Image: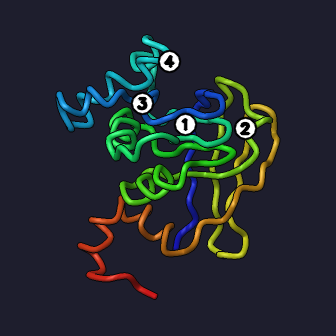
Amino acid sequence: MTALRIEGRARIFGDGINTDYIITSRRKRESLDPQILRQYLFEEVDPAFASSIQAGDLIVAGKNFGCGSAMEVAVTAVLGAGIRAVIARSFSRTYYRNAINNGLLPVVCDTNQIQGGDQIAIHSTDQQEAGMQVINLSTGAVIVAEALPQIMLDIFESGGLVPYFRRHGDFRL
């Protein structure tokens, strides 16, 4: 594994952001194209949000991000907007797995030291034991994040589960 570094501007959300807030379920009936879905990202929470996203922005949230239904399209819309990672205090189990399987990095840590607009860096090292850090480049705060198992990092670095299997044919244990 190589060292991972993702940088971007923090876009803040609170606790209990469910998949229907990320993208309403009616939108998946219209299209599954990430470039179309991106325009509806968080439309129920903030109708202007999707038009304000810049590629590389990072979602920062509280507890239980992605709760509700297990809509994979809630990850697809985030990726379609050019967002590569979501940092949250906790994730619903299904959103967390859907994120990894589709190439979106879910980072679990205390998000209280991050404000909207802060520049954030997510960093991992070459050593598995070191885990991950979230660095608030705007304030200098360093937040220790939960380490991801190596297989999940490998899946993320491959771009998701399907590209991982195309490359490796099976899980490398």
The residue furthest front is: 68
Residue at point 44% right, 11% down? Answer: 48
Please name the residue that numbered disc 2 is placed on: 137
Residue at point 51% right, 33% down? Answer: 57
Q: Residues within 10 Å of mark 1 (few under 14, many from 20)?
A: many
Spatial separation of the CA atoms under disc 2 and disc 1: 13 Å
Please name the residue that numbered disc 3 is placed on: 20
In depth, the one of 133 and 76 nearer the eye is: 76
**Which x, y percent locates residue 85?**
51, 45
Please name the residue that numbered disc 1 is placed on: 58
Residue type marked 1: Leu
Decide which of tag 3 and tag 4 comes sooner along the chain.
Answer: 3
Decide which of tag 2 and tag 1 comes sooner along the chain.
Answer: 1
Q: Secondary structure at mark 1?
A: strand
In depth, the one of 115 and 92 nearer the eye is: 92
The residue furthest top is: 48
Please name which of the two marks, 1 or 3, marks the residue nearer to the observer.
3
